[in-house]
Amino acid sequence: MPRVFSGIQPSGELHIGNYLGAVRNWVQLQDQYECIFSIVDLHAITQPYEPGELSARTLEMAIGLLAAGLDPDKCTIFVQSHVPQHAELMWMFNTVAPLGELERQTQFKDKSSRMESVPAGLLNYPVLQAADILLYRADLVPVGEDQLQHLELSREIARRFNARFGVDFFPEPKPLLTPGTRIMGLDGEAKMSKSLGNTIGVLESPEAIWEKLRPAKTDPARKTRKDPGNPDVCNIYSLHKHFSDGATVTDVATRCRGAAWGCLDCKRVLADNMIAHLAPMRERAAALRDRPERVRAVLEAGAEHCRRLASRTMAEVGRIMGFLPPGM
Ligand code: SF4
């Protein structure tokens, strides 16, 4: 069965952008492939972060993933730093990764342009991503359009390693394009992201969801209730498509174009549908929070499985690269 690898940062809160853009798809993939999903804390530390919060955010992300439907009987879930071979293989790959390509990565250019002092870890982020995927010799990686460039670099690193050492060891992982993935934030201006503060958490209370939706950006043409709008430029309408049924979506568009209701009415319907959709996840999360030892056991079993797979890969990498085996 083809192997799938993907990762998510421990931002603490699984928000609807993560959920609709990636995790909902993972829940389906676990029934079709051998899936390995990682909470990538080693990636998270390439950006400014609070050390005192990292472990709680990691655990909270694990709860979010399990509540969203990842099933440890069907897939492997683990924390990246619990498998030290990720950093080890990254170092090996640093010797074949092309510096020019790393400097050309859009995400590096974007993030580094906002920093006074750029850490080398930010530049090497895609090398760690290549190590994440290739450590398990994964066949497929679920990605959105905006991550294709990083995946191409992983493929390039696999090719360069194989060519440099004259082997056919690492497969070139292929993209599994995630349908309909770019979820905009509540500001309607940028992709939904915890760091931009424009998110709704999957596990938030009904009251909090409404408080966040109420002031969310809509079509600016609707200055008053009497102004007709264009749902196609409104993020609230996009969210309806994910959380409301087909008849409601059609009705929303008609009422918007005909100025038959206000944006607040439209948002209230969305809020009710969103709250109902997310309710089972909230309930599962509450049960998991009552039993944190169960979550820790899932992560430890996942890490143990991954360490076993990773040590096989690293033994072979050491042999290919010509290291003296330990104990010889
Ligand atoms: S009525 Fe709904 S779809 Fe139209 S602009 Fe307002 S919030 Fe957006």
Image (cartoon, rainbow, N blue to C red):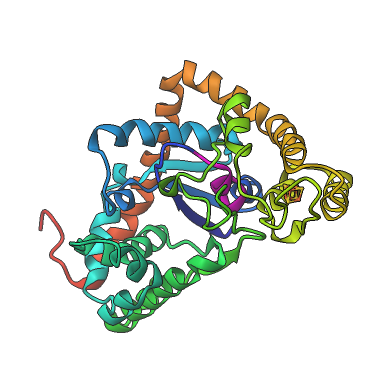
* Residue 216 vertical placement versus 87 (above, below): above
Q: Is residue 21 magenta?
A: yes
Between 138 and 216, the one nearer to me in the picture: 216
Prevalent SS, magenta region? helix
Residue at 12% across, 64% down = 324
Q: Is residue 80 magenta?
A: no
Q: Quadrant of the N terminus?
A: bottom right
Give x and y (percent) for residue 46. Answer: 27, 54
Residue at 33% across, 46% down = 41
Residue 12 falls in which quadrant of the image? top left
Residue at 48% across, 54% down = 6
Total of numbered circles in the picture?
Answer: 0
Identify the residue at the far top of this view. 290
Q: Quadrant of the C terminus?
A: bottom left
Note whether residue 253 is visible.
yes
* Residue 28 vertical placement versus 103 (above, below): above
Residue at 72% across, 30% down = 276
Give x and y (percent) for residue 162. Answer: 34, 78
In the figure, is residue 44 to the left or right of 35? left
Give x and y (percent) for residue 230. Answer: 77, 59
In the figure, is residue 265 to the left or right of 290? right
Between 221 and 46, the one nearer to me in the picture: 221
In the figure, is residue 242 to the left or right of 94? right
The residue segment tinted magenta is 14-22
Note whether residue 300 is visible.
no
